[in-house]
Amino acid sequence: MSALGGAKPAGGSTGIAPVPTLISLVIFVIIFAIMYMYGGSLGVTALIGIVIGGLLIGFGVHFVPVGGAPAAMGQAPGIATGVAMLAAGGGLAGLFGGAWAASQGTLVAVVTGAIGGGLMLAITCFFVNFVYIYGMGIPAASGKVKKDPITGDSQPEYKSQGTEGHGLPFVSFVGGVIGGILGGAGGTLIYLMLLDVYNASLPGVMKATAVQVEPIAVSLAGMFAIGMFLVIAVLAAYNITGTIEGPHDPKFKRFPRALIASAVASALCGVAAIMLVMV
Amino acid sequence: MDNIVFSIGITALAGALATVAGAAEDVESDIGSQGDPNSQVQLAPQMGYIHRIYNKAIAGEPPAWGLWIALGAGIAWAFMAMQINPILAIVLGAGLATFVQGVYSTTAYLGRTASLSKFGQPVYIDIIKSMTTVTMAHAFVAIFATVTLCHLMNAALGHPFPLPLLGLVWGIALGAAGSATGNPYYGKERQYQTQNFGAGVPISASGNIVRYAEAGERNSLDNGFFTAKLGGPASGVCFGLIVFLELWRTVLFEKIGAGWGAIIVGVIIILIFTIIDRYIEVWARKNYGPYTKPEETSS
Protein backbone atom coordinates (compact mmCIF):
# COMPACT_ATOMS: atom_id res chain seq x y z
CA MET A 1 0.00 0.00 0.00
CA SER A 2 1.25 3.42 -0.94
CA ALA A 3 2.35 5.51 2.00
CA LEU A 4 0.49 8.43 0.49
CA GLY A 5 -2.73 6.47 0.85
CA GLY A 6 -5.79 6.72 -1.32
CA ALA A 7 -7.52 3.97 -3.22
CA LYS A 8 -5.89 2.76 -6.39
CA PRO A 9 -7.77 2.78 -9.69
CA ALA A 10 -10.58 0.30 -9.45
CA GLY A 11 -10.86 -2.84 -11.47
CA GLY A 12 -7.59 -3.58 -13.19
CA SER A 13 -7.10 -6.67 -15.29
CA THR A 14 -9.70 -9.29 -14.51
CA GLY A 15 -8.94 -11.65 -17.40
CA ILE A 16 -7.36 -15.07 -17.21
CA ALA A 17 -4.14 -15.50 -19.17
CA PRO A 18 -4.33 -18.77 -21.17
CA VAL A 19 -0.67 -19.88 -20.96
CA PRO A 20 -0.26 -19.65 -17.17
CA THR A 21 -3.68 -21.31 -16.78
CA LEU A 22 -2.61 -24.19 -19.00
CA ILE A 23 0.66 -24.59 -17.09
CA SER A 24 -1.30 -24.54 -13.81
CA LEU A 25 -3.63 -27.23 -15.13
CA VAL A 26 -0.70 -29.44 -16.14
CA ILE A 27 0.95 -29.02 -12.73
CA PHE A 28 -2.40 -29.78 -11.09
CA VAL A 29 -2.84 -33.04 -13.05
CA ILE A 30 0.77 -34.11 -12.37
CA ILE A 31 0.29 -33.53 -8.63
CA PHE A 32 -2.82 -35.70 -8.59
CA ALA A 33 -1.06 -38.42 -10.61
CA ILE A 34 1.85 -38.45 -8.13
CA MET A 35 -0.62 -38.56 -5.25
CA TYR A 36 -2.45 -41.52 -6.78
CA MET A 37 0.83 -43.40 -7.34
CA TYR A 38 2.08 -42.97 -3.78
CA GLY A 39 -1.02 -42.33 -1.67
CA GLY A 40 -3.73 -44.42 -3.32
CA SER A 41 -7.38 -43.55 -2.88
CA LEU A 42 -6.94 -42.25 0.70
CA GLY A 43 -4.34 -39.76 -0.46
CA VAL A 44 -6.36 -38.65 -3.49
CA THR A 45 -9.55 -38.22 -1.41
CA ALA A 46 -7.65 -36.15 1.14
CA LEU A 47 -6.05 -34.06 -1.61
CA ILE A 48 -9.47 -33.36 -3.18
CA GLY A 49 -10.70 -32.16 0.24
CA ILE A 50 -7.61 -29.97 0.64
CA VAL A 51 -8.11 -28.40 -2.81
CA ILE A 52 -11.78 -27.69 -2.01
CA GLY A 53 -10.65 -26.12 1.28
CA GLY A 54 -8.09 -24.03 -0.61
CA LEU A 55 -10.73 -22.85 -3.08
CA LEU A 56 -13.04 -21.83 -0.22
CA ILE A 57 -10.25 -19.81 1.41
CA GLY A 58 -9.12 -18.20 -1.87
CA PHE A 59 -12.70 -17.20 -2.71
CA GLY A 60 -13.47 -16.10 0.85
CA VAL A 61 -10.54 -13.68 1.08
CA HIS A 62 -12.08 -11.63 -1.76
CA PHE A 63 -15.19 -10.94 0.36
CA VAL A 64 -13.32 -9.43 3.33
CA PRO A 65 -13.42 -5.61 3.19
CA VAL A 66 -9.86 -4.43 3.78
CA GLY A 67 -8.79 -0.81 3.56
CA GLY A 68 -5.18 -1.04 4.73
CA ALA A 69 -3.33 2.15 5.66
CA PRO A 70 -5.82 4.61 4.06
CA ALA A 71 -8.64 3.11 6.14
CA ALA A 72 -6.65 3.88 9.28
CA MET A 73 -6.91 7.59 8.42
CA GLY A 74 -10.55 7.41 7.34
CA GLN A 75 -9.43 7.93 3.72
CA ALA A 76 -10.89 4.71 2.30
CA PRO A 77 -13.57 2.24 3.39
CA GLY A 78 -12.75 -1.12 4.90
CA ILE A 79 -10.93 -2.55 7.87
CA ALA A 80 -7.58 -0.92 8.63
CA THR A 81 -5.27 -3.89 8.29
CA GLY A 82 -3.85 -6.24 5.63
CA VAL A 83 -5.98 -8.54 3.48
CA ALA A 84 -4.16 -11.78 4.23
CA MET A 85 -3.83 -10.97 7.91
CA LEU A 86 -7.47 -10.24 8.57
CA ALA A 87 -8.64 -13.24 6.57
CA ALA A 88 -6.17 -15.37 8.53
CA GLY A 89 -7.44 -13.95 11.83
CA GLY A 90 -11.01 -14.91 11.00
CA GLY A 91 -10.22 -18.20 9.30
CA LEU A 92 -7.94 -19.43 12.07
CA ALA A 93 -10.52 -18.53 14.74
CA GLY A 94 -12.86 -20.74 12.69
CA LEU A 95 -10.25 -23.49 12.51
CA PHE A 96 -10.04 -23.35 16.33
CA GLY A 97 -13.77 -24.12 16.59
CA GLY A 98 -13.73 -26.67 13.78
CA ALA A 99 -10.80 -28.60 15.30
CA TRP A 100 -12.66 -28.70 18.62
CA ALA A 101 -15.69 -30.26 16.90
CA ALA A 102 -13.60 -32.71 14.82
CA SER A 103 -14.89 -35.73 16.75
CA GLN A 104 -18.49 -34.93 15.76
CA GLY A 105 -18.07 -35.66 12.08
CA THR A 106 -16.79 -33.77 9.05
CA LEU A 107 -20.01 -31.86 8.29
CA VAL A 108 -20.57 -30.60 11.83
CA ALA A 109 -16.88 -29.68 12.21
CA VAL A 110 -16.73 -27.79 8.91
CA VAL A 111 -19.95 -25.87 9.65
CA THR A 112 -18.72 -25.14 13.20
CA GLY A 113 -15.47 -23.78 11.73
CA ALA A 114 -17.42 -21.68 9.24
CA ILE A 115 -19.58 -20.15 11.96
CA GLY A 116 -16.50 -19.53 14.14
CA GLY A 117 -14.86 -17.56 11.31
CA GLY A 118 -18.09 -15.67 10.59
CA LEU A 119 -18.52 -14.84 14.28
CA MET A 120 -14.99 -13.45 14.58
CA LEU A 121 -15.42 -11.19 11.58
CA ALA A 122 -18.97 -10.13 12.54
CA ILE A 123 -17.70 -8.89 15.92
CA THR A 124 -14.61 -7.28 14.37
CA CYS A 125 -16.61 -5.53 11.62
CA PHE A 126 -19.12 -4.28 14.17
CA PHE A 127 -16.34 -2.76 16.29
CA VAL A 128 -14.84 -1.07 13.23
CA ASN A 129 -18.12 0.76 12.68
CA PHE A 130 -18.45 1.39 16.43
CA VAL A 131 -15.09 3.20 16.54
CA TYR A 132 -15.80 5.14 13.34
CA ILE A 133 -19.26 6.24 14.45
CA TYR A 134 -18.94 6.75 18.20
CA GLY A 135 -15.20 7.42 18.45
CA MET A 136 -14.68 9.57 15.38
CA GLY A 137 -18.17 10.76 14.43
CA ILE A 138 -17.88 9.46 10.87
CA PRO A 139 -20.74 7.62 9.09
CA ALA A 140 -19.98 4.67 6.79
CA ALA A 141 -19.72 5.38 3.06
CA SER A 142 -18.55 3.36 0.09
CA GLY A 143 -16.26 4.84 -2.54
CA LYS A 144 -16.99 2.26 -5.23
CA VAL A 145 -20.79 2.27 -5.58
CA LYS A 146 -23.45 4.96 -5.52
CA LYS A 147 -25.94 2.82 -3.66
CA ASP A 148 -25.43 0.00 -1.19
CA PRO A 149 -26.47 -3.10 -3.18
CA ILE A 150 -28.23 -4.64 -0.16
CA THR A 151 -29.89 -1.72 1.63
CA GLY A 152 -30.14 0.73 -1.28
CA ASP A 153 -28.66 3.54 0.87
CA SER A 154 -27.05 6.26 -1.22
CA GLN A 155 -23.32 6.61 -0.60
CA PRO A 156 -21.59 9.58 -2.35
CA GLU A 157 -23.01 12.36 -0.13
CA TYR A 158 -21.79 10.57 3.01
CA LYS A 159 -18.19 10.60 1.80
CA SER A 160 -16.25 13.39 3.51
CA GLN A 161 -14.26 15.77 1.33
CA GLY A 162 -11.01 14.49 -0.14
CA THR A 163 -11.58 10.84 0.81
CA GLU A 164 -12.63 7.66 -0.98
CA GLY A 165 -15.19 6.85 1.73
CA HIS A 166 -14.82 5.36 5.20
CA GLY A 167 -16.14 2.77 7.62
CA LEU A 168 -18.05 -0.33 6.63
CA PRO A 169 -21.28 0.12 4.68
CA PHE A 170 -23.71 -2.77 5.23
CA VAL A 171 -22.65 -4.66 2.09
CA SER A 172 -19.03 -4.64 3.32
CA PHE A 173 -20.13 -5.93 6.73
CA VAL A 174 -22.00 -8.79 5.08
CA GLY A 175 -18.98 -9.44 2.83
CA GLY A 176 -16.75 -9.68 5.89
CA VAL A 177 -19.02 -12.24 7.53
CA ILE A 178 -19.22 -14.31 4.32
CA GLY A 179 -15.42 -14.16 3.99
CA GLY A 180 -15.02 -15.39 7.56
CA ILE A 181 -17.52 -18.21 6.98
CA LEU A 182 -15.75 -19.42 3.81
CA GLY A 183 -12.30 -19.07 5.37
CA GLY A 184 -13.30 -20.92 8.54
CA ALA A 185 -14.90 -23.73 6.53
CA GLY A 186 -11.90 -24.04 4.19
CA GLY A 187 -9.31 -24.06 6.99
CA THR A 188 -11.27 -26.67 8.95
CA LEU A 189 -11.72 -28.89 5.88
CA ILE A 190 -7.96 -28.89 5.21
CA TYR A 191 -7.30 -29.72 8.88
CA LEU A 192 -9.78 -32.62 8.89
CA MET A 193 -8.42 -34.13 5.67
CA LEU A 194 -4.85 -34.03 6.97
CA LEU A 195 -5.95 -35.38 10.36
CA ASP A 196 -7.54 -38.41 8.68
CA VAL A 197 -4.36 -39.13 6.71
CA TYR A 198 -2.08 -38.73 9.74
CA ASN A 199 -4.33 -40.81 12.01
CA ALA A 200 -4.29 -43.60 9.40
CA SER A 201 -0.58 -43.48 8.49
CA LEU A 202 1.35 -42.37 11.58
CA PRO A 203 0.84 -45.56 13.67
CA GLY A 204 2.59 -47.56 10.91
CA VAL A 205 5.32 -44.97 10.31
CA MET A 206 6.15 -44.50 14.00
CA LYS A 207 5.34 -48.07 15.05
CA ALA A 208 3.02 -46.85 17.80
CA THR A 209 -0.65 -47.13 18.73
CA ALA A 210 -3.32 -44.79 17.40
CA VAL A 211 -3.75 -43.23 20.87
CA GLN A 212 -0.03 -42.53 21.15
CA VAL A 213 0.22 -40.78 17.79
CA GLU A 214 -2.95 -38.71 18.16
CA PRO A 215 -1.28 -35.62 19.71
CA ILE A 216 1.35 -35.67 16.95
CA ALA A 217 -1.33 -36.08 14.27
CA VAL A 218 -3.36 -33.17 15.68
CA SER A 219 -0.28 -30.93 15.93
CA LEU A 220 0.97 -31.75 12.43
CA ALA A 221 -2.46 -31.31 10.85
CA GLY A 222 -2.96 -28.02 12.71
CA MET A 223 0.43 -26.65 11.64
CA PHE A 224 -0.04 -27.60 7.99
CA ALA A 225 -3.60 -26.25 7.97
CA ILE A 226 -2.43 -22.88 9.34
CA GLY A 227 0.50 -22.82 6.90
CA MET A 228 -1.70 -23.59 3.89
CA PHE A 229 -4.23 -21.00 5.03
CA LEU A 230 -1.53 -18.33 5.03
CA VAL A 231 -0.17 -19.42 1.62
CA ILE A 232 -3.60 -19.19 -0.01
CA ALA A 233 -4.59 -15.98 1.81
CA VAL A 234 -1.38 -14.27 0.63
CA LEU A 235 -1.93 -15.50 -2.95
CA ALA A 236 -5.45 -14.06 -2.92
CA ALA A 237 -4.13 -10.83 -1.40
CA TYR A 238 -1.68 -10.46 -4.31
CA ASN A 239 -4.61 -10.90 -6.68
CA ILE A 240 -6.49 -8.13 -4.88
CA THR A 241 -3.42 -5.79 -4.80
CA GLY A 242 -3.90 -3.71 -1.70
CA THR A 243 -7.45 -2.93 -0.76
CA ILE A 244 -10.95 -4.18 -1.53
CA GLU A 245 -14.33 -3.04 -0.27
CA GLY A 246 -16.11 -6.38 -0.52
CA PRO A 247 -18.28 -8.22 -3.04
CA HIS A 248 -19.47 -4.96 -4.69
CA ASP A 249 -15.91 -3.82 -5.45
CA PRO A 250 -14.89 -4.12 -9.14
CA LYS A 251 -11.74 -5.93 -7.95
CA PHE A 252 -13.96 -8.77 -6.73
CA LYS A 253 -14.36 -9.88 -10.36
CA ARG A 254 -10.71 -10.96 -10.32
CA PHE A 255 -11.51 -13.98 -8.14
CA PRO A 256 -11.39 -16.67 -10.91
CA ARG A 257 -7.64 -16.07 -11.25
CA ALA A 258 -7.17 -16.54 -7.52
CA LEU A 259 -9.20 -19.76 -7.62
CA ILE A 260 -6.83 -21.28 -10.21
CA ALA A 261 -3.78 -20.22 -8.18
CA SER A 262 -5.37 -21.41 -4.91
CA ALA A 263 -6.19 -24.83 -6.40
CA VAL A 264 -2.61 -25.39 -7.59
CA ALA A 265 -1.02 -23.98 -4.42
CA SER A 266 -3.22 -26.04 -2.11
CA ALA A 267 -2.59 -29.19 -4.19
CA LEU A 268 1.17 -28.59 -4.05
CA CYS A 269 1.19 -27.91 -0.30
CA GLY A 270 -1.26 -30.76 0.25
CA VAL A 271 0.85 -33.33 -1.60
CA ALA A 272 3.90 -32.30 0.46
CA ALA A 273 1.93 -32.58 3.71
CA ILE A 274 0.48 -36.00 2.80
CA MET A 275 3.67 -37.53 1.37
CA LEU A 276 5.43 -36.63 4.60
CA VAL A 277 3.86 -39.75 6.08
CA MET A 278 3.03 -41.82 2.99
CA VAL A 279 6.38 -42.17 1.23
CA MET B 1 -23.60 -29.95 36.14
CA ASP B 2 -20.40 -29.19 38.07
CA ASN B 3 -18.50 -29.68 34.85
CA ILE B 4 -20.63 -27.12 33.00
CA VAL B 5 -20.32 -24.61 35.86
CA PHE B 6 -16.54 -25.11 35.84
CA SER B 7 -16.42 -24.65 32.05
CA ILE B 8 -18.51 -21.48 32.21
CA GLY B 9 -16.17 -20.11 34.88
CA ILE B 10 -13.17 -20.86 32.67
CA THR B 11 -14.97 -19.25 29.71
CA ALA B 12 -15.61 -16.09 31.71
CA LEU B 13 -12.00 -15.98 32.91
CA ALA B 14 -10.72 -16.50 29.35
CA GLY B 15 -13.01 -13.69 28.12
CA ALA B 16 -11.71 -11.35 30.83
CA LEU B 17 -8.10 -12.22 30.02
CA ALA B 18 -8.79 -11.63 26.32
CA THR B 19 -10.25 -8.20 27.13
CA VAL B 20 -7.10 -7.22 29.01
CA ALA B 21 -4.94 -8.66 26.21
CA GLY B 22 -6.83 -6.77 23.48
CA ALA B 23 -6.55 -3.45 25.32
CA ALA B 24 -2.83 -3.93 26.06
CA GLU B 25 -2.18 -5.02 22.47
CA ASP B 26 -3.77 -1.91 21.02
CA VAL B 27 -2.01 0.50 23.38
CA GLU B 28 1.31 -1.24 22.65
CA SER B 29 0.64 -0.90 18.95
CA ASP B 30 -0.22 2.81 19.34
CA ILE B 31 2.78 3.70 21.50
CA GLY B 32 5.09 1.66 19.27
CA SER B 33 3.27 2.79 16.10
CA GLN B 34 3.03 -0.83 14.98
CA GLY B 35 0.03 -0.87 12.66
CA ASP B 36 -1.05 0.71 9.38
CA PRO B 37 -1.06 4.31 10.74
CA ASN B 38 2.72 4.02 10.94
CA SER B 39 2.73 4.69 7.18
CA GLN B 40 2.12 8.34 8.13
CA VAL B 41 4.90 8.34 10.75
CA GLN B 42 7.24 7.04 8.06
CA LEU B 43 5.88 9.49 5.48
CA ALA B 44 5.97 12.68 7.60
CA PRO B 45 9.75 13.40 7.39
CA GLN B 46 9.59 12.86 3.62
CA MET B 47 7.03 15.70 3.49
CA GLY B 48 9.26 17.90 5.67
CA TYR B 49 7.66 17.21 9.05
CA ILE B 50 10.36 16.04 11.49
CA HIS B 51 8.84 14.38 14.55
CA ARG B 52 9.56 12.48 17.78
CA ILE B 53 7.02 9.67 17.28
CA TYR B 54 8.24 6.09 17.74
CA ASN B 55 8.42 4.31 14.38
CA LYS B 56 8.46 0.50 14.43
CA ALA B 57 5.96 -1.42 12.20
CA ILE B 58 8.01 -4.62 12.41
CA ALA B 59 5.39 -6.52 10.42
CA GLY B 60 1.63 -6.34 10.16
CA GLU B 61 0.12 -6.56 13.63
CA PRO B 62 -1.43 -10.05 13.24
CA PRO B 63 1.76 -11.91 12.21
CA ALA B 64 3.85 -9.96 14.72
CA TRP B 65 1.51 -10.93 17.56
CA GLY B 66 1.26 -14.46 16.18
CA LEU B 67 5.04 -14.70 16.53
CA TRP B 68 5.28 -13.26 20.04
CA ILE B 69 2.42 -15.24 21.50
CA ALA B 70 3.44 -18.50 19.81
CA LEU B 71 6.93 -17.87 21.18
CA GLY B 72 5.64 -17.20 24.70
CA ALA B 73 3.34 -20.22 24.51
CA GLY B 74 6.10 -22.46 23.13
CA ILE B 75 8.57 -21.51 25.86
CA ALA B 76 5.88 -21.89 28.55
CA TRP B 77 4.98 -25.29 27.10
CA ALA B 78 8.61 -26.40 27.23
CA PHE B 79 8.91 -25.27 30.86
CA MET B 80 5.68 -27.09 31.75
CA ALA B 81 7.09 -30.24 30.14
CA MET B 82 9.99 -29.82 32.57
CA GLN B 83 7.43 -30.03 35.42
CA ILE B 84 7.61 -26.30 36.23
CA ASN B 85 4.47 -24.78 37.76
CA PRO B 86 2.20 -23.51 34.88
CA ILE B 87 1.91 -19.96 36.25
CA LEU B 88 5.67 -19.63 36.60
CA ALA B 89 6.16 -21.24 33.18
CA ILE B 90 3.76 -18.76 31.54
CA VAL B 91 5.43 -15.80 33.27
CA LEU B 92 8.85 -17.00 32.06
CA GLY B 93 7.54 -17.66 28.54
CA ALA B 94 5.87 -14.24 28.34
CA GLY B 95 8.99 -12.58 29.74
CA LEU B 96 11.32 -14.13 27.18
CA ALA B 97 8.89 -13.38 24.32
CA THR B 98 8.78 -9.77 25.56
CA PHE B 99 12.56 -9.51 25.23
CA VAL B 100 12.29 -10.68 21.63
CA GLN B 101 9.65 -7.99 21.07
CA GLY B 102 12.04 -5.45 22.59
CA VAL B 103 14.87 -6.50 20.27
CA TYR B 104 12.59 -6.29 17.22
CA SER B 105 11.29 -2.88 18.35
CA THR B 106 14.77 -1.42 18.81
CA THR B 107 16.10 -2.67 15.49
CA ALA B 108 12.90 -1.61 13.70
CA TYR B 109 13.09 1.91 15.15
CA LEU B 110 16.77 2.29 14.31
CA GLY B 111 16.40 0.82 10.82
CA ARG B 112 13.28 2.73 9.87
CA THR B 113 14.47 6.04 11.27
CA ALA B 114 17.97 5.71 9.81
CA SER B 115 16.40 5.18 6.38
CA LEU B 116 14.90 8.66 6.75
CA SER B 117 18.26 10.37 7.40
CA LYS B 118 18.34 11.97 3.95
CA PHE B 119 15.15 13.83 4.90
CA GLY B 120 16.81 15.14 8.09
CA GLN B 121 15.02 12.87 10.57
CA PRO B 122 17.33 12.25 13.57
CA VAL B 123 17.50 9.01 15.56
CA TYR B 124 16.57 10.04 19.11
CA ILE B 125 18.33 7.83 21.66
CA ASP B 126 16.10 9.10 24.50
CA ILE B 127 13.06 7.94 22.49
CA ILE B 128 14.50 4.42 22.28
CA LYS B 129 15.24 4.42 26.01
CA SER B 130 11.88 5.72 27.17
CA MET B 131 9.43 4.23 24.64
CA THR B 132 10.82 0.75 24.02
CA THR B 133 10.43 -0.29 27.65
CA VAL B 134 6.85 1.00 27.71
CA THR B 135 5.91 -1.01 24.61
CA MET B 136 7.61 -4.04 26.18
CA ALA B 137 5.55 -3.64 29.35
CA HIS B 138 2.32 -3.53 27.37
CA ALA B 139 3.49 -6.46 25.25
CA PHE B 140 4.17 -8.49 28.40
CA VAL B 141 0.62 -7.92 29.65
CA ALA B 142 -0.87 -8.91 26.28
CA ILE B 143 1.38 -11.98 25.86
CA PHE B 144 0.87 -13.18 29.43
CA ALA B 145 -2.93 -12.81 29.24
CA THR B 146 -3.18 -14.52 25.83
CA VAL B 147 -0.86 -17.41 26.70
CA THR B 148 -2.84 -17.92 29.92
CA LEU B 149 -6.16 -18.06 28.07
CA CYS B 150 -4.63 -20.51 25.57
CA HIS B 151 -3.46 -22.65 28.49
CA LEU B 152 -6.99 -22.58 29.93
CA MET B 153 -8.44 -23.64 26.57
CA ASN B 154 -5.99 -26.52 26.35
CA ALA B 155 -5.73 -27.73 29.95
CA ALA B 156 -9.15 -26.88 31.39
CA LEU B 157 -11.50 -26.97 28.37
CA GLY B 158 -9.71 -29.79 26.54
CA HIS B 159 -9.03 -28.22 23.13
CA PRO B 160 -6.94 -30.71 21.12
CA PHE B 161 -4.36 -28.17 19.80
CA PRO B 162 -1.08 -27.99 21.75
CA LEU B 163 -0.26 -24.71 23.49
CA PRO B 164 2.13 -23.21 20.87
CA LEU B 165 -0.37 -23.84 18.07
CA LEU B 166 -3.17 -22.23 20.10
CA GLY B 167 -0.77 -19.34 20.73
CA LEU B 168 -0.26 -18.86 16.98
CA VAL B 169 -4.00 -19.03 16.21
CA TRP B 170 -5.08 -16.63 18.96
CA GLY B 171 -2.03 -14.38 18.48
CA ILE B 172 -3.01 -13.78 14.86
CA ALA B 173 -6.67 -13.28 15.88
CA LEU B 174 -5.59 -10.83 18.62
CA GLY B 175 -3.54 -8.80 16.16
CA ALA B 176 -6.38 -8.84 13.60
CA ALA B 177 -9.01 -7.69 16.11
CA GLY B 178 -6.74 -5.10 17.73
CA SER B 179 -5.54 -3.57 14.48
CA ALA B 180 -9.02 -3.50 12.91
CA THR B 181 -10.56 -1.74 15.90
CA GLY B 182 -7.70 0.37 17.22
CA ASN B 183 -5.91 1.55 14.06
CA PRO B 184 -8.49 4.12 12.86
CA TYR B 185 -8.64 5.74 16.29
CA TYR B 186 -4.86 6.16 16.45
CA GLY B 187 -4.43 6.90 12.75
CA LYS B 188 -7.20 9.41 12.18
CA GLU B 189 -8.24 10.67 15.57
CA ARG B 190 -4.81 11.11 17.16
CA GLN B 191 -2.26 11.55 14.40
CA TYR B 192 -4.54 13.98 12.56
CA GLN B 193 -6.07 15.67 15.60
CA THR B 194 -5.87 19.06 13.89
CA GLN B 195 -8.15 17.91 11.05
CA ASN B 196 -11.93 18.30 11.27
CA PHE B 197 -13.70 16.02 13.72
CA GLY B 198 -16.35 13.85 12.10
CA ALA B 199 -14.66 13.54 8.72
CA GLY B 200 -11.93 11.42 7.18
CA VAL B 201 -8.46 12.86 6.61
CA PRO B 202 -8.26 14.41 3.12
CA ILE B 203 -5.66 12.58 1.06
CA SER B 204 -3.91 15.92 0.45
CA ALA B 205 -3.14 16.19 4.20
CA SER B 206 -1.19 12.91 4.23
CA GLY B 207 2.05 13.17 6.20
CA ASN B 208 1.07 16.31 8.11
CA ILE B 209 0.73 14.53 11.46
CA VAL B 210 0.42 16.44 14.74
CA ARG B 211 3.93 16.89 16.14
CA TYR B 212 3.44 19.25 19.09
CA ALA B 213 1.82 18.59 22.46
CA GLU B 214 0.48 20.88 25.21
CA ALA B 215 4.10 21.41 26.25
CA GLY B 216 6.95 20.67 23.89
CA GLU B 217 7.01 18.08 21.15
CA ARG B 218 4.53 15.24 21.13
CA ASN B 219 5.89 11.76 21.67
CA SER B 220 4.36 8.31 21.53
CA LEU B 221 3.60 8.16 25.26
CA ASP B 222 1.11 10.99 24.65
CA ASN B 223 -0.45 8.83 21.94
CA GLY B 224 -0.77 5.90 24.35
CA PHE B 225 -2.40 8.17 26.91
CA PHE B 226 -4.98 9.28 24.31
CA THR B 227 -5.78 5.95 22.67
CA ALA B 228 -6.08 4.15 26.03
CA LYS B 229 -9.35 6.07 26.46
CA LEU B 230 -11.27 4.50 23.56
CA GLY B 231 -9.22 2.61 20.97
CA GLY B 232 -7.61 0.33 23.57
CA PRO B 233 -10.75 -0.58 25.54
CA ALA B 234 -12.75 -1.05 22.31
CA SER B 235 -10.09 -3.44 20.99
CA GLY B 236 -10.15 -5.23 24.33
CA VAL B 237 -13.92 -5.65 24.32
CA CYS B 238 -13.77 -6.78 20.67
CA PHE B 239 -11.20 -9.52 21.33
CA GLY B 240 -12.83 -10.39 24.66
CA LEU B 241 -16.21 -10.90 22.98
CA ILE B 242 -14.65 -13.02 20.22
CA VAL B 243 -13.00 -15.36 22.72
CA PHE B 244 -15.90 -15.39 25.19
CA LEU B 245 -18.70 -15.98 22.68
CA GLU B 246 -16.71 -18.62 20.76
CA LEU B 247 -16.06 -20.57 23.96
CA TRP B 248 -19.49 -19.91 25.49
CA ARG B 249 -21.45 -21.24 22.51
CA THR B 250 -19.25 -24.34 22.38
CA VAL B 251 -19.20 -25.10 26.11
CA LEU B 252 -22.93 -24.64 26.65
CA PHE B 253 -24.52 -25.79 23.40
CA GLU B 254 -22.14 -28.28 21.80
CA LYS B 255 -23.89 -31.27 23.37
CA ILE B 256 -27.32 -30.21 22.04
CA GLY B 257 -28.25 -31.78 18.69
CA ALA B 258 -24.85 -33.48 18.22
CA GLY B 259 -23.00 -30.22 17.65
CA TRP B 260 -25.74 -28.35 15.77
CA GLY B 261 -26.80 -26.50 18.95
CA ALA B 262 -23.53 -24.54 19.03
CA ILE B 263 -23.84 -23.83 15.30
CA ILE B 264 -27.38 -22.45 15.62
CA VAL B 265 -26.38 -20.28 18.58
CA GLY B 266 -23.39 -19.03 16.53
CA VAL B 267 -25.71 -18.07 13.65
CA ILE B 268 -28.02 -16.25 16.08
CA ILE B 269 -25.08 -14.30 17.57
CA ILE B 270 -23.90 -13.33 14.04
CA LEU B 271 -27.44 -12.12 13.22
CA ILE B 272 -27.60 -10.09 16.46
CA PHE B 273 -24.31 -8.35 15.61
CA THR B 274 -25.56 -7.75 12.06
CA ILE B 275 -28.73 -6.07 13.37
CA ILE B 276 -26.80 -3.91 15.86
CA ASP B 277 -24.33 -2.92 13.13
CA ARG B 278 -27.14 -1.92 10.78
CA TYR B 279 -28.80 0.04 13.61
CA ILE B 280 -25.71 2.12 14.36
CA GLU B 281 -25.05 2.63 10.65
CA VAL B 282 -28.55 4.09 10.17
CA TRP B 283 -28.22 6.02 13.45
CA ALA B 284 -25.04 7.68 12.17
CA ARG B 285 -26.61 8.57 8.82
CA LYS B 286 -29.60 10.18 10.56
CA ASN B 287 -27.73 12.00 13.30
CA TYR B 288 -24.59 13.13 11.47
CA GLY B 289 -26.28 13.70 8.11
CA PRO B 290 -24.67 13.88 4.67
CA TYR B 291 -21.57 16.03 3.96
CA THR B 292 -22.98 17.29 0.67
CA LYS B 293 -26.41 17.55 -0.93
CA PRO B 294 -27.64 14.26 -2.43
CA GLU B 295 -26.68 13.80 -6.08
CA GLU B 296 -29.39 13.51 -8.71
CA THR B 297 -29.19 9.85 -9.63
CA SER B 298 -30.12 9.02 -13.18
CA SER B 299 -30.36 5.27 -12.50
Image: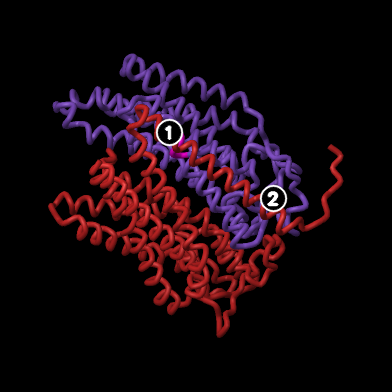
Chain colours: A purple, B red
- Residue, disc 2: A141
Q: Quadrant of residue A153?
A: top right
Please give the name of the residue rendered at 60% of the width and 65% of the height, measured from the top-left corner: B43
Chain letter, disc 1 residue: B
Against A234, residue A255 (above or below) is: above
Magenta: predominant secondary structure element? helix
Q: Whole-percent x and y of residue B69?
A: 34, 54
The verdict on residue B280 being magenta is no
Q: Can you say whether B36 is above or below A273 in the image?
A: below
Residue A275: percent from left, percent from top: 31, 25
Q: Nearer the viewer, residue A39 or A129?
A: A129
Q: Residue furthest front?
A: B1
Q: Is residue A254 above or below residue B121?
A: above
Q: Quadrant of the C terminus of chain B?
A: top right
From what the image shows, is residue A197 above or below residue A120?
A: above
Q: Left of B229 or right of it: where is B3?
A: left
Please report the residue visible at 57 percent of the width from the left and 80 percent of the height from the top: B213
Label 1, secondary structure: give it: helix
Q: Which residue is mark 1?
A: B263
What percent of the width, then of the height, locates residue A74?
64, 58
Which of discs 2 and 1 lies nearer the camera? The answer is 1
The residue type indicated by label 2 comes to Ala
Magenta residues span A113-117
**Residue at the (23%, 54%) spot, across then down:** B76
What's the residue at 40%, 35% (across, down)? B262
Residue B127 horizontal/vertical position (percent):
45, 76
Q: Is residue A35 left or right of residue A5?
A: left
Q: Quadrant of the N terminus of chain B?
A: top left
Assign a secondary structure to mark 2: loop
Q: Residues within 10 Å of mark 1 (few under 14, many from 20)?
A: many
Q: Nearer the viewer, residue A185 or A66?
A: A185
